[in-house]
Image (cartoon, grey):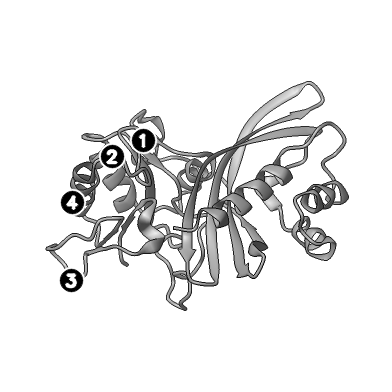
Amino acid sequence: MEPAAKVAAVRLVEAFGTWPAGKGGVADRAARARALGIPAARAAMLATQTGSLTPPADAAVVRVIDAQYGGILSDSASVLVVCSQTTRTGSTISDGGTTVDVRLSRTSAGWEVTALHPARPGPARPLDATQRKVLADARIQLPPAAAADVRSGLVHTEVLDAMLRLAGTYRMSVSVVRSGHPLDVFGTDRPSDHPLGRAFDVWRIDGHPVVDPATSRALITAFMRAAAAAGADNVGGPVQLSGGTVPNQFFSDPTHHDHVHIGFHA
């Protein structure tokens, strides 16, 4: 819908989340932002908002897995940049990653990043049987922040049960579960189901990205209906479906052009 917004978000996350030895400080991050054409004052501000994107390490390399809309309006946007990250501290190599809610505004010069909100999944807790099944299921591909959400114990069981049920038929790549998503439905004051641990988004089904025009609409439609059959009250995607067992069970809008939202109301 607005690819330039995604490009601006991804380039800054890549610049902040990747650094050579000795170049991981705030001033170094600000310099990398300025190299992207971001004004000095804003670059300095953004360099202090990196949170989980810049863990303590000597060096790091980030890899963007997906960039999806957290919300898209005419003059503002939220782009959720989902990434993995490899860090080196001394001789120790570690794998991690996060999701960053990148906020942007449209100006006469194009889309400009205005703020970063990195994921904060919360500490891991002892796993129950359902959580272990989700984390072990090879047909449920969870990026680092989403996997941490499951380990935190803050994702409702009905969400995890739906993942397992869908995985019986589909291979699905999850983008966002709880953390790294806007607290409110973008552009409104209505709380989103995601931070409450009552929703998850899927960006790829059976290896086919939802955003790809070549991906079968029949595949997406079948997946959306299967999500509703798995108990979801709110299923959004690039296809507007009719029917449903509860009012307004299906929806489509520009924000959901690139993923399927599967939500469960309290």
The kind of residue on which mark 3 rests is: Pro
Whether residues under marks 4 and 3 lie with C-beta atoms below 8 angstroms apart, the answer is no
Distance of label 1 from label 4 (alpha carbons)? 18 Å
Give percent across and percent down for residue 182.
Answer: 51, 64
Q: Which residue is labeled 1 in the image?
A: 140
Q: Which of marks 2 and 4 is nearer the N terminus?
A: 2
Distance of label 2 from label 4 (alpha carbons)? 15 Å
Residue shown at 23%/51% (left/top)?
A: 224
Give percent across and percent down for residue 195.
Answer: 47, 61
The kind of residue on which mark 4 rests is: Arg
The kind of residue on which mark 1 rests is: Ile
Q: Which residue is labeled 3 in the image?
A: 247
* Depth check, front residue: 34 or 17: 34
Residue shown at 50%/58% (left/top)?
A: 181
Where 63 falls versus 32 (above or below)?
above
Q: Which of marks 1 and 4 is nearer the N terminus?
A: 1
* Depth check, front residue: 219 or 84: 219
Instruction: Tell us which disc is closer to us: 2 or 3.
Output: 3
Residue shown at 34%/32% (left/top)?
A: 207
Question: Pointer 4: residues within 10 angstroms few (<14), some, or many (20+)?
Answer: some
* Residue 115 placement, left or right of 168: right
Whether residues under marks 1 and 2 lie with C-beta atoms below 8 angstroms apart, the answer is yes
Give percent across and percent down for residue 145.
Answer: 53, 45
Numbered label attached to residue 225: 4
Whether residues under marks 2 and 4 lie with C-beta atoms below 8 angstroms apart, the answer is no
Give percent across and percent down for residue 237.
Answer: 30, 56
Q: Which residue lies furthest to the bottom in this view?
A: 189
User: Would you say residue 63 is visible in this rendering?
Assistant: yes
Q: Which residue is labeled 2 in the image?
A: 164
